[in-house]
Image (tube, rainbow, N blue to C red):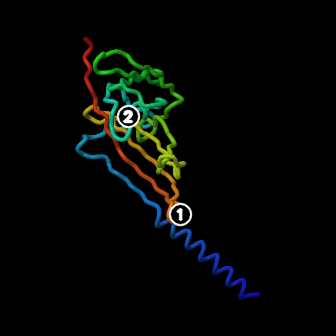
Amino acid sequence: MNRNKFLYSRWIFHTIGTVTLSLLLTSCVMHNKYPSSWGDLIPVEENKCPDISGVYRNNNVPYYLSEVLGFEKKIGEIFIEIIQLKDGTFEIFGCGIEEQKLVNKKFYAKEKYRCTEEGVKTSSLTKSVLKAEGFSPIGYAFVSFYLTTNRGGDLVVKETGSGIALSIIPPFPIIGAATDCYRFSHEDLKEE
């Protein structure tokens, strides 16, 4: 009887050790630092949202600014204008380069964001990853965005995320976390 208990406890120990080791070996962390060539970030004051008002280019890789700001789909605007109002809300406009007219307008209420020491946390999203044509997703990523500006007037978005996926051969979980920064250039659009 004692021998069986010993073998059973050894089996549990090996199983837990194998699972823990496989999780450690299949997890990764990627942290890309803010590039110093982009200029200094404007410090965020405690308990206060940074002023992110301005006109910015909408396109960047891998996100459109409109997507980061919570639009339900990618929109075709080339520029996004953010106006921070005194009551703590944002007005967001999109405009094309040729017609220079309002294409889309979205009111971004105070409940949709919060102020943090990293900037304005604008949205979070869950997206499927490792999805092949005709197959169900085999993983999900959970992403949050923080917005602030640099001294050059550009909008800087810090993306933080984590995810879990299932490898196909052999089947085991893959866990990861990442941080990355994107810059949306400030534009001076002159009204004619």
Q: Looking at numbered disc 2 in the image, what kind of residue is underneath it?
A: Tyr
Q: Position of residue 113 (x, y in %)?
A: 49, 32
The correct choice, above or below, for 134 with respect to 75 in the image is: below
Q: Position of residue 73 (x, y in %)?
A: 46, 31
Q: Position of residue 178 (x, y in %)?
A: 42, 51
Residue beneath the point at 50% across and 40% down: 125
Give the side of residue 185 with respect to residue 16, left or right: left
Residue beneath the point at 30% across and 39% down: 41
Please state which of residues 59 and 150 is positioned toward the viewer in this rendering.
59
The correct choice, above or below, for 50 with respect to 33 in the image is: above
Callout 2: SS: loop
Quadrant where the C terminus lies?
A: top left
Q: Position of residue 72 (x, y in %)?
A: 49, 30
Give the side of residue 99 with respect to residue 2, left or right: left
The correct choice, above or below, for 103 with respect to 155 in the image is: above
Residue beneath the point at 68% across and 84% down: 6
Residue wearing tag 2: 64
Residue wearing tag 1: 172
Q: CB under 8 Å between callouts 2 and 1?
A: no
Q: Looking at numbered disc 1 in the image, what kind of residue is underneath it?
A: Phe
Please state which of residues 40 and 123 is positioned toward the viewer in this rendering.
123
Please state which of residues 165 and 2 is positioned toward the viewer in this rendering.
165
Q: Which picture quadrant has residue 119?
A: top left
